[in-house]
Amino acid sequence: MVPRRNGGGARVGGRAQPAPRAHFALAVDDLDAAIQTLRASGCHIEQARPIPGRRRCFTRDPAGNRIELLAYDEAPATVVYEELAGGPG
């Protein structure tokens, strides 16, 4: 195994391996339904350390990349940007 300098995965037998903790996250409306669907498809669900205000878990894609699924206890705040009057344009 040869570690990559960028902190990513490693190469094993010439094949790239995903970094063990690197991942992206998908916010879902119903985490329980998402978990049920993934398990029914044969996916393994990994428990995640609790974070206040959200429920979450991890799974992996067929290449072994880690994917976080999360559901907020309350809808996250929406930021609305308004154009300032008298600005350029």
Image (tube, helix red, strand yellow):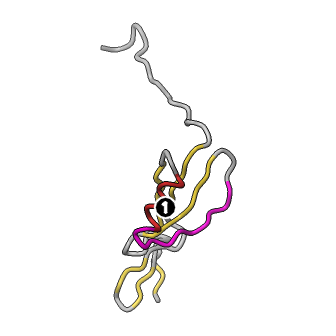
35 falls in the magenta region: no
Residue that extends furthest to the top in the rendered view of this protein: 86
**What residue is at 43 percent from the left and 75 percent from the top?**
64
Q: Nearer the viewer, residue 77 or 75?
A: 75
41 falls in the magenta region: yes
Residue 11 position in % (x across, y down) = 41, 84
Mark 1 neighbour density, 10 Å: few (under 14) some (14–19) many (20 or more): few
**What residue is at 62 percent from the left and 48 percent from the top?**
54
Q: Is the magenta stretch mostly helix, strand or loop?
A: loop
Q: Which of 83 and 64 is in front in this view?
A: 64
Asked which quadrant contains residue 15, the reply is bottom left
Tell me: residue 9, above or below residue 15.
Answer: above
Q: In this figure, which residue is indicated by the disc labeled 1? A: 36
**What residue is at 44 percent from the left and 64 percent from the top?**
38
Question: Is 88 on the left-hand or right-hand side of 4?
Answer: left
Residue 29 position in % (x across, y down) = 49, 45
- Indicate the secondary structure of the residue bearing disc 1: helix
**What residue is at 44 percent from the left and 74 percent from the top?**
18
Residue 22 position in % (x across, y down) = 50, 66
Q: Which of 71 and 24 is in front in this view?
A: 71
Tell me: residue 24, above or below residue 54.
Answer: below
Q: Give the range drawn in magenta.
A: 40-50
Label 1 sits on what residue type? Answer: Gln
Residue 50 position in % (x across, y down) = 68, 57
Tell me: residue 87, above or below residue 26.
Answer: above
Tell me: residue 4, above or below residue 87.
Answer: below
Residue that extends furthest to the left in the rendered view of this protein: 89
